[in-house]
Image (tube, rainbow, N blue to C red):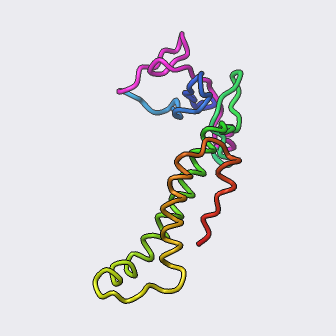
Amino acid sequence: MTKTIKVKYNQETTKVEGYYPSFINYPNSIIDEEAKTIDGLPYIEITEEEHQAALELNIEAVVDGVIVEYTKTEQELVEELKKSKLAACNSYLKSTDWQAIRKADSGEDMKEGVSENRALARMLQDDIEDATSLEELELINTDF
């Protein structure tokens, strides 16, 4: 007998919500074999080989009853790029905080360009937060 794995997924997003091998008992989940649902979400069944292939290919979606590679929405891509660009600004600011503190404490000047780049990083944070498309975000350069 081939062991199967139930793949629970969200019909709206198509994202895989979890893998449930048939040889494990799940006392905290409600598995309805007749309705083919786990905790109210639909599932499909795949073989161990299909599961291994899905893991290797980072496949995370179910479309028309078939496990497939998940394609991110533009909004998800926008949010990822925003996080990345904000992280670059925050990293720059954090790495130069010591110079700003030294300037405040002793009056000693920051290295050339640091003050301007810190101001730019803070301005870019606002621009990044306000951006709504990939095109807008790609125009924002966070290389300091």
Asked if the stretch drawn in magenta spans residue 93, the answer is: no
Q: Residue at x 59, y 22 (%)?
A: 12
Asked if the stretch drawn in magenta spans residue 35, the answer is: yes
Q: Quadrant of the N terminus?
A: top right
Front-most of residues 107 and 33: 107
Front-most of residues 59 and 84: 84
Give the residues drawn in magenta, as a range: 28-54
Quadrant of residue 47 within the rendered picture: top right
Instruction: Residue 94 in the image: state x and y as whole percent.
Output: 42, 71
18 relative to 11, above or below: below
Q: Residue at x 54, y 11 (%)?
A: 35
Q: Quadrant of the C terminus?
A: bottom right
Front-most of residues 100 and 19: 100
Count up the numbered dots.
0
Quadrant of residue 3 within the rendered picture: top right
Q: Position of 1 compared to 119: left or right?
A: right
Q: Residue furthest top?
A: 34
Instruction: Residue 73 in the image: state x and y as whole percent.
Output: 65, 36
51 relative to 8, above or below: below
Q: Position of 43 compared to 69: left or right?
A: left
Front-most of residues 54 and 137: 137
Q: Residue at x 66, y 38 (%)?
A: 74
Q: Residue furthest left?
A: 105
Instruction: Residue 36 in the image: state x and y as whole percent.
Output: 55, 16
Q: Position of 81 compared to 69: left or right?
A: left
Instruction: Residue 102 in the image: state x and y as whole percent.
Output: 34, 84
